[in-house]
Amino acid sequence: MKIAILSQDASLYSTRRLKEAGEAQGHEMRVINYLRCYMNITSHKPTVVYNGNELENFDAIIPRIGASRTFYGTAVVRQFEVMGVFSANESQAISRSRDKLRCLQILAREGIGLPVTGFAHATQDIDGLIDTVGGAPLVIKLLEGTQGIGVVLAETHQAAKSVIEAFRGLDANILVQEFIKEAKGADIRAFVIGTKVVASMKRQGAEGEFRSNLHRGGMAEKIKLTPEERSTAVRAAKAMGLRIAGVDMLRSNHGPVVMEVNSSPGLEGIEKASEVDVAGKMIDFLEKNVKLGKTGDRIQY
Ligand code: ADP
């Protein structure tokens, strides 16, 4: 097959591994910087042009769209879809997953376990918002944050109120969430491909840190998931319409709760921690599904 990896940087671990894994399985792999593509939007012959050449005869694309480039990146993915090319994740599903609030609303609709969450922009009723999630301690998140930036633990009602007021002053959209204390600064990432969890890891935050992000000094290790955690991860990916997803969960007293579903999950942490060839499994998945010619997102939200 001829497969394009849509990535801004060919030297990134995930991009390199996907290229290697595809080539090892006999495929022609090309890394395409989607920001440098332009599109010819016609119904007669839609095309994507890169470095002056039309990108033709691709069987599949693997989108690795940066969070800050969602708008243009998903437009390029959509153009490939218009051309009938199979995408590891479809443009609609990527856009959907990029909005934390939309993501939680979709998961809630499917009855998937979530931390109790409130959403606000400029509420006057801060006490009411805090009560919605069961009072302090609680977690306040900037809707636009990534890598743990803009995620704050407020230990007291007063602290929560001050932080919410500060964010309100900045005109930011915020999520207010029940603090899952029993997770003890750890979260779990399940890597879902199709209808299976193919690899998983536990990330533990640095000493005294409730955020487990690897970018914040967290450590990753291999972990075996419970059947409930596996099925929660698979259901979450399916609810979002993602074929490939990194599902982040916390272990709460009432079972796994999903924090986020990521449409371009990184490969470095998970491959190293789990010792699974995740890139190879993504290529296997493409091989099976391109043959079946499966396309079409059927989620309505
Ligand atoms: P980001 O998308 O910026 O990484 P997350 O929502 O994933 O933000 O939060 C970062 C980290 O903070 C998580 O990996 C988790 O360890 C911790 N965390 C987030 N929400 C909660 C919560 N409700 N209870 C306990 N810990 C949380």
Image (cartoon, rainbow, N blue to C red):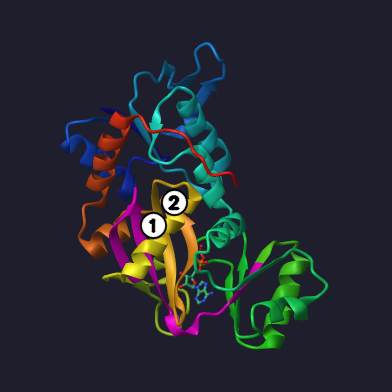
Magenta-highlighted residues: 175-202
Quarter of the image for residue 252 reads bottom left
Any part of residue 108 in sight:
yes
Question: In the picture shown, does residue 74 fall above or below 111?
Answer: above
Q: Position of residue 229 (x, y in %)?
A: 37, 68
Q: Is residue 69 visible?
A: no
Which amino acid type is shown beneath numbered disc 2? Lys
Residue 54: % across, % down = 42, 17
Which residue is more in the foreground, 58 or 50?
58
- Residue at the disc numbered 2: 238
Q: Amino acid at mark 1?
A: Val
Image quadrant in which the N terminus is located: top left
Answer whether residue 178 is magenta in the image. yes
Q: Splitting the image into 4 quarters, where does residue 62 fall?
A: top left
Residue that badge 1 annotates: 234
Per the image, label 2 sits on a secondary structure element best described as: helix
| Magenta part, dominant SS | strand
